[in-house]
């Protein structure tokens, strides 16, 4: 049905587009008129959603009314003809996470929510975007529920979400280490750890350089939230695996459908299974909700968006992965110095 639309979209972008991609955007438009929320609901790369919306406007399936994206009569008729739709059955309490951060110690929650108010602002240089603080706490709750917190040695690779601080406040981990390129954040983490009386070993370091030898094979758990080029994913998760000390160690990381297509997911999952030889134990959709960052107009996706309006509500979400190592698992600690790990065709937020 959408052959001509797909052909036009394919002439505008190299991101893979499918008939289902068109359907996903049209279905998102049945729930919202906000371009940012359309991207959130469509579960397609943001840059692709922008091109699809622009093309569907050209083809008369969508209309723009006062900066709102609305279905035209043609669009409504098409959906009726297809007979497709969806409803949201997500648990309103945990938002589909399966854990409640509210079950953590009340003092931990209170102190962490106060601490994050003073952290440095997210900057585009390092592709930073902060999840809402409640979701940082939910990450810690999930770790605890899987036996990955108490008495464990934990390394955080890039910590703009301050997971190390949330873990430190619980006083349950045996050891915490952070490798982070941004000196503003490493200074902040050191200051907070000292103030609250727990220890975090902090390394101000570009992860394109190999991890120091003292960090290799030392930890039980790693956590990271990398940029979403294939290079960056292999780099950050590979470094994390290299830091783990034995089979059945665990790793946590985020992966979006905003900066990464399912085609990219497939390629990266091949790396996980075939190169790193690990197993995926959990994939929790929309686990992480991000605060809107201050550099929206400077990100790559801004040039694609058909309506130049800033987001009014949080819209960027990511899926939370948990992996485990097994006998024969191996990481990646080779240098990538000087390589661009922040940009590819699909990345909208860098």
Image (cartoon, rainbow, N blue to C red):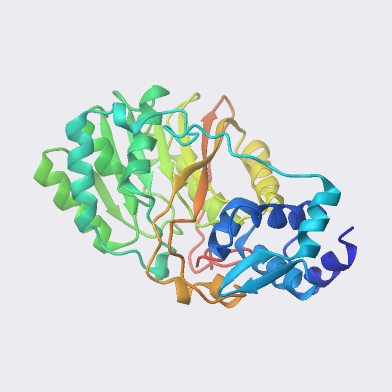
Q: Percent from the top left, x then y, of residue 345? A: 65, 67
Residue 157 position (above or below residue 232)? above
Q: Percent from the top left, x then y, of residue 305? A: 59, 72
Residue 102 can be seen, yes or no = yes
Q: Percent from the top left, x then y, of residue 220? A: 39, 29
Q: Viewer-proximal residue, 284 or 276?
A: 284
105 relative to 282 in the view: left or right: left
Residue 13 can be seen, yes or no = no
Q: Viewer-proximal residue, 218 or 7?
A: 7
Tally of marks: 0
29 relative to 96 in the view: left or right: right
Q: Viewer-proximal residue, 280 or 113?
A: 113
Q: Dividing the picture into quarters, in which one does residue 166 lie?
A: top left
Residue at left 51%, top 65%? Answer: 349
27 relative to 293 in the view: left or right: right
Residue 32 position (above or below residue 84)? below
Q: Quadrant of the N terminus?
A: bottom right
Q: Percent from the top left, x then y, of residue 35? A: 57, 64
Name, please, the residue furthest toward the front: 73
Residue 2 position (above or below residue 171)? below
Residue at left 41%, top 59%? Answer: 129
Q: Dividing the picture into quarters, in which one does residue 293 lie?
A: bottom left
Residue 331 position (above or below residue 250)? below
């Amino acid at each position: 049905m959408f052959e001509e639309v797909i052909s036009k979209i394919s002439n505008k972008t190299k991101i893979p587009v499918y008939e289902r991609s068109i359907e996903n955007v049209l279905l998102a438009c049945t729930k919202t008129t906000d371009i940012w929320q359309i991207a959130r609901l469509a579960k397609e790369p943001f840059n692709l959603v922008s091109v699809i919306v622009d093309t569907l406007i050209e083809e008369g399936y969508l209309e723009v009314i006062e900066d709102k994206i609305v279905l035209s009569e043609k669009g409504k008729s098409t959906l009726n003809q297809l007979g497709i739709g969806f409803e949201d059955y997500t648990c309103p309490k945990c938002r589909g996470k399966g854990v409640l951060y509210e079950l953590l110690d009340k003092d931990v929650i209170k102190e962490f929510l106060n601490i994050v108010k003073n952290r440095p602002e997210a900057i585009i240089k390092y592709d930073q975007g902060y999840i809402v603080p409640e979701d940082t706490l939910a990450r810690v709750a999930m770790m605890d529920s899987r036996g990955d917190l108490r008495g464990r040695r934990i390394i955080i690779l890039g910590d703009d979400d301050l997971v190390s601080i949330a873990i430190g406040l619980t006083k349950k981990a045996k050891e915490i280490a952070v490798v982070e390129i941004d000196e503003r954040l490493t200074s902040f983490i050191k200051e907070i750890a000292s103030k609250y009386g727990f220890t975090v070993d902090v390394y101000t370091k570009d992860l394109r350089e190999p991890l120091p030898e003292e960090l290799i094979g030392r930890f039980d758990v790693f956590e990271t939230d990398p940029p979403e080029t294939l290079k960056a994913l292999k780099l950050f998760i590979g470094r994390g695996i290299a830091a783990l000390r034995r089979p059945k160690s665990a790793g946590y990381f985020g992966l979006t459908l905003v900066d990464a297509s399912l085609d990219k997911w497939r390629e990266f999952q091949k790396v996980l299974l075939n190169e790193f030889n690990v197993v995926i134990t959990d994939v929790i959709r929309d686990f992480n909700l991000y605060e809107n960052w201050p550099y929206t107009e400077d990100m790559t996706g801004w040039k694609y968006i058909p309506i130049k309006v800033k987001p009014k509500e949080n819209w960027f979400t990511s899926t939370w992965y948990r992996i485990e190592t097994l006998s024969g698992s191996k990481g990646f600690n080779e240098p990538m110095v000087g390589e661009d790990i922040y940009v590819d065709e699909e990345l909208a937020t860098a």
